[in-house]
Amino acid sequence: MKHKIYLFFFLTLLKYALSLRLNNTLSKKNNFVAEKYFRKENDNENLKFQIIDDLEKINEEFSNDVNTAKIFVRDTFLDTEASFKEISDDVVKIISKYSFSIDEKLNVLNGLLQEFIENNKSSIFNSSDENMISHKNKIKEVSDSILCKLKKLIELNIFNKYHAILKFGNQNIKNETLEALRIERKLSDKLKKELLKYKTLENEDIKESESTNFLKSVYNKFIVKLDEIINEMSKELSHILL
């Protein structure tokens, strides 16, 4: 009888010990699973914040490049204004008017990306990781493409400056401009060669109306191209989240 009692207690203790060991094993396993889950959640959050950070940097770089372009545009217009002071104050006023108009349009271009990111930041953040990465890459592609086209447009504006001065400026101004043209780094050799054909052109009897019509023509074309860039960027950004 005693043996049966002892055996009963032994089996009960053994069952308890095995149960305790099993619970500890399951607890550790559950803790590992939970830890792995929360670590994954944290990694996802970090990725999302990193992408939003990247978008802010893309916008900052874009804004800096557009502001640099604005400086180049202002400088070219100021140079052109200074060269035409001896011809007519009315011509200078026309140049100044176009300078202001183009500066305002560059401000519009500058604000497009910032407005898009600010308006869609929450939507992008709440999308899947895959979509977030895709959105970021597309925004970067649009930014780079627009800046590339803007760079070419700035080159055109510099070309217009030299073109106008060499075509209508007096001989002293022409000589100074030709010297500046030879060391100009923002124009290709091909465009420089195109401008040098005005080297021997005599500008003594140029009428004010001729210079006015010429300037209006080149600056209107410039504005059309700038409007095209603005419209293209607006359209490309609107398609990113579709």
Image (tube, helix red, strand yellow):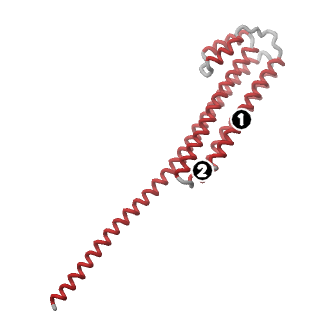
Image vertical order of residue 226 relative to residue 39, above or below: above
Query: As drawn, is 38 to the left or to the right of 175?
Result: left
Quadrant of residue 3 within the rendered picture? bottom left
Dividing the picture into quadrants, the one containing residue 127 is: bottom right
Tell me whether circle 1 and circle 2 mark residues in contact (CB < 8 Å): no
Left or right: 142 in relation to 2: right
Question: What amino acid is found at the position of numbered circle 2 in the picture?
Answer: Lys
Residue 89 visible at all: no
Which residue lies at the image location 69% right of the left edge and 15% below the top edge? 195
- Label 1 or label 2, whichever comes before in sequence order: 2
140 to 49, vertically: above or below: above
Residue drawn at point x = 37 percent, y = 62 percent: 32
Residue indicated by mark 2 = 121
The residue sitting at 61% across, 22% down in the picture is 186
Tell me if 115 is positioned left or right of 51 in this view: right
Count numbered badges in the picture.
Answer: 2
Q: Position of residue 77 (x, y in %)?
A: 71, 24
Up-down: is 107 above or below 217? below
The residues tagged by marks 1 and 2 sit, at their Cα atoms, a distance apart of 26 Å
User: Label 1 is placed on what type of residue?
Assistant: Glu
* Residue at point 75%, 11% (across, down): 170
Task: Name the residue nearer the viewer: 172 or 200.
Answer: 200
Which quadrant of the figure contains the N terminus? Answer: bottom left
- Horizontal and vertical percent for residue 78? 70, 23
Q: Position of residue 145 (x, y in %)?
A: 61, 35
The numbered disc on residue 228 is 1
Q: What numbered label is drawn on residue 29?
A: none
Residue 174 can be seen in this image: yes
| Quarter of the image where one finds residue 79 | top right
In the structure shown, which secondary structural element does the residue marked by tag 1 occupy?
A: helix
Query: Closer to the observer: label 1 or label 2?
Result: 1
Question: Looking at this view, is 194 or 83 the one in front?
Answer: 194
